[in-house]
Image: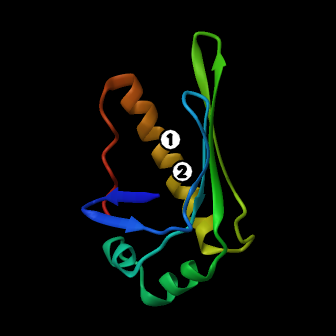
Amino acid sequence: MVWEEGGRRTADPGQVVLAAEPGRLLSYTWHTFTPAWADAVGLGHEVYEGLAAEPRSRVDFAIEPSGDTVRLTVTHGGLAPDGTIKELIGEGWPAIVSSLKSLLETGEELPEPPR
């Protein structure tokens, strides 16, 4: 997988799509941190080193019918119990899902909070 974000390109052959069923499921390994990414998001060297040492995790997006709409379930597993990644995604995923909901309802993403 290759990520394009904020003018940065992150690629890692170990970060792969595990399953993809259009309109139903996307599952992939997650855990590619680069020094450029850490600098762009304002992480210090020690925090970056800690993130890079954590195990690769897995993200699943499941979509299922729910009446006239659909239900999206995001599961992020395989995390170190006391890891920094677990702490960061506790803020990150809710913001991403809220922005997606806004995009679907209004055509506009939520603005990114200042860093």
Q: Could you say which disc has been placed on residue 47 in the image?
A: none
Compared to residue 102, the image places residue 8 above or below, namely below
| In-front residue for pair 62/92 | 62
Query: What residue is shown with label 2?
Result: 93
Amino acid type, residue under disc 1 in the picture:
Val
For image coordinates 33% across by 52% down, the residue present is 112
Kindly identify the residue that appears in the image at 54 percent across and 30 percent down: 22
Compared with 79, 34 (above or below) is below
Q: Position of residue 107 (x, y in %)?
A: 31, 27
Tag 2: amino acid: Trp
Report x, y in % for residue 78: 72, 63
Element at badge 2? helix
- Residue at coordinates 34% horizontally, 55% vertically from top-left? 113
Quadrant containing the C terminus in the rendered view: bottom left
Q: Are marks 2 and 1 in contact (CB under 8 Å)?
A: yes
Q: Nearer the viewer, residue 97 or 56?
A: 56
Q: Is residue 65 above or below residue 90?
A: above
Q: Please provide percent x and percent y for residue 106.
A: 33, 24
Classed neighbour count for the residue bearing mark 2: other residues with Cα under 10 Å, few (<14), some (14–19), many (≥20)? some
Q: For marks 2 and 1, give the CA distance.
A: 6 Å
| Residue found farthest to the top | 68
| Image-quadrant location for residue 90 | bottom right
The residue to which callout 1 is attached is 97
Where's residue 102, x and y in %? 40, 32
Crowdedness near tag 1: few (<14), some (14–19) or many (≥20) residues, C-alpha within 10 Å: some
Helix, strand or loop for disc 1 = helix
Residue projecting furthest to the bottom? 46
